[in-house]
Every structure is written in C-alpha cells, then in structure tokens.
Amino acid sequence: MASVNESKVLTAKEQLDLKNQRLIRKLLWMLLGSLLFAFALVPIYNVLCSMTGLNGKTQNTATVLAKAKIDNTRWVNVQFTSSVMSGLGWNFYPKTTSVRVHPGQIETVIFVAKNTTNEVVVGQAIPSVTPGIAAANLKKIECFCFIRQSLKPGEERAMPLRFFVSPDLPKDVSDMTLSYSFFPAVK
Amino acid sequence: MSTTTVAHHEEHAEHPTGIMRWLTTTNHKDIGTMYLTFALIMFFVGGAMILGIRAELFKPGLQLMNPEFFNQLIGVHALIMIFAALMPAATGFANWMIPLQIGAPDMALPRLNNWGFWLLPPSAILLTLPFTLALFGIGDGALATGWTFYPPLSIQGGIGVDFAIFAVHLLGISSVLGSINIIVTVFNMRAPGMTLMKMPMFVWGWLITAFLLIATIPVLAGAVTMLLTDRHFGTHFFDAAGGGDPIMFQHLFWFFGHPEVYILLLPVWGFIPQILETFSRKPMYGYKAQVYSFWGVGVLSVVVWAHHFFTSGMPVPALLYFMYSTMAISLPLAVMFFCWIKTMWKGSMSFETPMLFTVGWIILFGIGGLTGLVLADVAADAQYHNSYFIVAHFHYTLFAGGIMGIMAGTYYWLPKMTGHMYNEKLGKLHFWLTAISFNLTFIPQFFLGLAGMPRRIPDYALQFAEFNMISTIAAFTLGLSQLLFVYNIVTCARGGKKATAQVWEGAQGLEWTLPSPPPYHSFTEQPTVK
C-alpha cells in the first residue's frame, strides 16, 4: 500500500510496479513454504508412524521378555510371507507359513535363506505387519532381522524368529500377516 | 491515465515478425496462442500413444508390443495429457482471456510469462526423448511406472524415470511461474470498479487454481527430488532397506495429485456458467454460491488425498476420515450443478457448438462425479481399486470434464480470438462424434472394471474380449474425430465470415466490448465497470 508521500512522487506505472513486487515477494515466500513443508513431511510421517504404528512397522530390537500372561481364551492366526527385492540373488522363504497361537504364548518359526550367487552377499530383512494396527502387538524376542545377514556363495541358513503376540491385541484382530522383504544391505 | 497508456502503446507498436515474434513475445495474446497450439499438438501426441495401447488391447494376447513398451506408453500418455495438454490449454485461455475479462492491458509480468511458456517444449522433449534414445540402444525407454512414479518400481526403473523427473521439475516451474503471474494480474490489474465479487467465473476458477498450484507443485517437486536422490545419491526416503517407507511417497504424491485434479478442472468450471448464460440469454444463477463453492472445493481438495490408496493399509479411523471428507466435496459440486441447471431454466436457449459441448459436459462430468462417489466408498473401493472402473471414472472427469470443457471454451472464444466464425456444421458434427464415441469408449470400461479387469496390463482374460473390442473401435473413432476440431480451428484462423465484437447474441462481459479479433494491445483506454 503506497503511502500518501509516495503517491506524490511516483507515477501510476511505478506504483503498480511496487505493488506487484510486494505481492510477488509474498507469493515466493508461499512457494518456499510449501517446498519446506514437503521435506518437513518426511520426519512428520516417521514420527506419526512410529507413535501409532500405522504403517505396519514392527519394533526392530528385541523385547525383554515381560511376564505376559497367556490368554487361553483367544486364538490368533499368524501368517508369514517373504519376498526378495531385486539386486539380491537369494532364495528366501518361511518353513511354516502360518501358526495358531494364544496371545502371550512364545512361538519360534524358521525362515530359510540361500545365496544362489557365487559371491558373498549381505542382506537386510525388513518386516511389515498387516493389519498395521496390530504391528505394535507383535513382540519379537529374537529375529534374524535385527542384524544384517551375510551369506557365502551357495550357503543356506535356517534363521529363527522368536515372538509372541501381546495380549492387548485389539479384540477384532484374529489374523495377522508378518511379511519379510530381504533387501541388499545398505553399505 | 489514458495518456500514459497511449504512450506505452506506441512504444511497443513495432514488434518483430516471423519466428522472433514468437520467441521474444511478451504479448499475452501471442503467448496464449502459443500455449493453446502447444496443448493441441501434445493432445495428439498423447492421443497417438493411447491409440497404440487401445490397439494392443483390441484382442487378448500380445500382438503389437511388449509389456515394457505398453507400460511406457501408459505413463507418458498420462503425463503428456495432464501436464502438456490440459494444463497448458487452461493456461493458454488464462493468458488470452484474463486480461480481456478484467480490463487489463496485458498480464502483470509479461517476460516471466514468455519464459513460462518456453519451458514447456523442452520438458515435452525430455518426456519423450527416451523413446528415441531406446531406438539407438541407449537406455530402455521412457518411464514405465505409470504417471504416479510409485517406488520401489520407480527406484529400480531405467533412465526414463530420470528424464521424467526432470521434465516434471521443468513443468512444475512453468506452472508456478504462470500462477504467480495470474495472481498478480488478478489482484493488481483489474479495471476500476471490477471488484473481486464482480469478476467473471473463469477468473475466479483460475485464481483458486493458481493458489492450489503454488501450494502443491512444490510438494511434487520435493517428492520427485527425493526419488532422484534415492536413485542416485544413496538416500533412503522411500527405500525400506535404509529405513525409508515407499508408502510415504504415495502420501507426498497424492498430496499434490488430488488438488491437481481440481487444478485441471477449476478453470473449466469457470467456462461453464459463462457459456450457459450466453446461450440461455439470462444472467447466471447464484454467482456468489458458485464462487464460494469453488473455494469450498479448493480447500477440501488438499485434505482428502489418501482416498487414492485406500487399499495400501490404513487404520479404520483414517479410512473413515478420508471417505467422509472425499464425499463432502460432492456438496459444493452439487451447489454448482444446481446453479448451472438453474441458469438454463426457462432461458431462451439455443444450441450452438459451445452450448452443445457445455450441456454434454454437464451430463458427462456428472457421471464422472457420481462414479467418484462410488470409489470414495472404502468398502466398495477395495473391489474397484486399480481396475478399469477407475480408468473409466477419471476419463469421465478429465476427458469429458476437462477436455470437452476446453473444447466448449475454444468454440466459444475462437471467433473472438481469430475474428472469424468457425464452421458451425462441422462444430456440431465434432460434438456428436466426440460425445458418442467417448461414451462408447468408456462405458464398456466401467463394466470391464466391475468384472475385474486390472488397469495397466497389456493382456487380459478371454471374457473381457468383446468390451475391449468395442472400446478400441470407439477410441479410434474418438481420436479421428478430433481431426475435425483441428480442421475447424485452422480454417477459422485463416478466414471465414467476419465475427462481430459481441459474437454471440447473449454474450456479456468486457472481452465482448473489444472488436474481434482484439487489437494487439487490448485496452488503450481502461474500461470502467459499474
């Protein structure tokens, strides 16, 4: 907004230019703001997901075995799937594809990985649970996904996963699927 | 005031001719014409690609191309139609019509305007170059992920992904520059008396579009930049192996992608009431209600993005929120539809080509909107997601709701732009061919989707054969009838019956007070609006 003083000195054209410059500056700030917002969404997303477990990420460290009571009145069906991402020459599959457990009951399942290439390959397994809401209730005591796995050429390894489903699993969840994707380990 | 504008006028009276006129022009009409021509050319490039796809889908099995090439055509078709055809067409009309409609001599930032346009041809080349490079054995062709760039596929893809990322950067810069220009023009260049609440609906539509572009294009630019650094510089924004999350890309992409739908549609929604009031020969009904509805849709569009990936796994409360907020968009839209129908009600209507396109648009866009409500239903979406149902739905909104609206606007303003009347008979023929073949192309796709045919797949089960055959034949009819459109535009630009200043009997607004075609510098004397 041109002040009274300015309007005496400036022509109409110059006044308009000044007004335009001010508006452009504001719009450029808006632009910068939305670009920063895009990058700010990354940490916001991660914090939201780890707080709520919305995206099915399980904890990646061992749970200290709490005195979880076994809830004998309930059965939960836990299924296992596996996949290998491109760039990793492995075979990888669960030996058991599903188990039926009581919440609180500790169970062990075996996953098998085999290096089909002729060099040493390091991989990292990334877990994901469906439904996502149940991810926080899958407690791992021991898992091959806690560390990187290094396989020699042709080596086959049976890897254990010890876990239990915590008894505070939401009432309407009766089935859950735990999926592991093996990625080439990040250097 | 008038003396200064006249002086300004004479200063620019001489302008270069030939190619230099177009390379260096800062005139809003020249730039508008370039945008519109570019959009028309790219409409045919994108159309040729989709006809390749329809030809492959004519019969079950693989006949014409391998699946990789099929996927490349699909992704590039979408990017070209959205970013290089529909958006530049809307920007072209903005350049041509906004200064005329608000009584301004030109756009506020004419040199920026020139740059905004000349960023487009390089980005179109970037998008399509990988096809040519592949012929010489460089790379494996264009982007093959679909236009949505979802990782992990896009992280694993070839150089086509990089080319598309840079093309999106350039296109984004171009749209953002155009938006800044439009906002500054609308806020600072209106004629005396032209208050915001007297602006034509098209100007309102573009003003909201411009704000949406400034708010969301940077998010897309950020997301594809993250993709680029994931691909080449060892970051792990979307790579689960390094702690990233591919689902996050979907959130970032659709935070841009859903407003983008309205970015494409809002300018067209502005055409509709203006054309309706002209050919109904009575003032539009509910101007204020329409302006507020535009804002309503604009604001709602940035808070509903996750309905594009209901099936990727979300907790029930989030699903319910995105379902209800998506359905809420139908409320302002219903207000608009009501206003548009009420504008025609008891008017003395005549059905010239623009009116035909507009009335057809209302019906077809209505179908697009209603099928969108079906998809917004979380329970139903699980069945329709990634099926041909969604393909049919968004072509009803973007081909009928977008491109047919642009065609209505083209026929409406073409006599104003060229100074000649177009061939009315050919125009009507073009409308009927387009409307009929469009429906015959996409109605079968609704049924295919309901029966379970997935999108983006080059082969299909035998049970889908008949509907695909109908769809392909109709798609070729649709494509070929667009040649009439080009013929009509070209002959109209070259000559024909002289158009009067008002052109249409019922036309109201500042652009119709200028002669047809308008002089190179629009308003030598600034008009006053009462």
Image (cartoon, coloured by chain):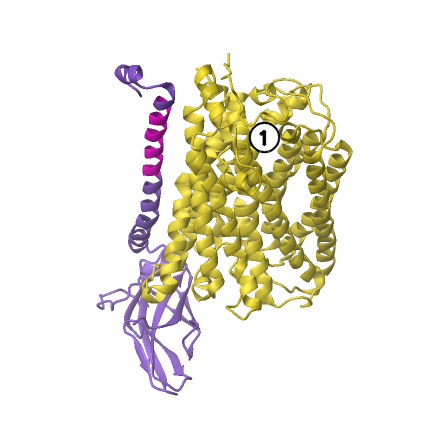
Question: Which colour represents chain A?
Answer: purple
The picture places residue A185, in percent across and down from the top left corner, at 33, 73
Give x and y (percent) for residue A64: 21, 68
Q: Is residue B42 found left or right of A72 in the rendered image?
A: right
Q: Left or right? Give the position of B45 relative to B206.
A: right
Q: Could one spot residue B420 in this view of the protein?
A: yes
Query: Which residue position holds label 1?
Result: B271
A24 in the magenta segment:
yes
Q: Position of residue B186 (x, y in %)?
A: 45, 27
Q: Which residues are magenta?
A: A15-30
Q: Quadrant of residue B313?
A: bottom left
Q: Is residue A94 visible?
A: no
Q: Residue at x 51, y 16 (%)?
A: B527
* Residue B428 versus residue B249 in the image, above or below: above
Q: Nearer the viewer, residue B122 or A166?
A: B122
Chain B's colour is yellow
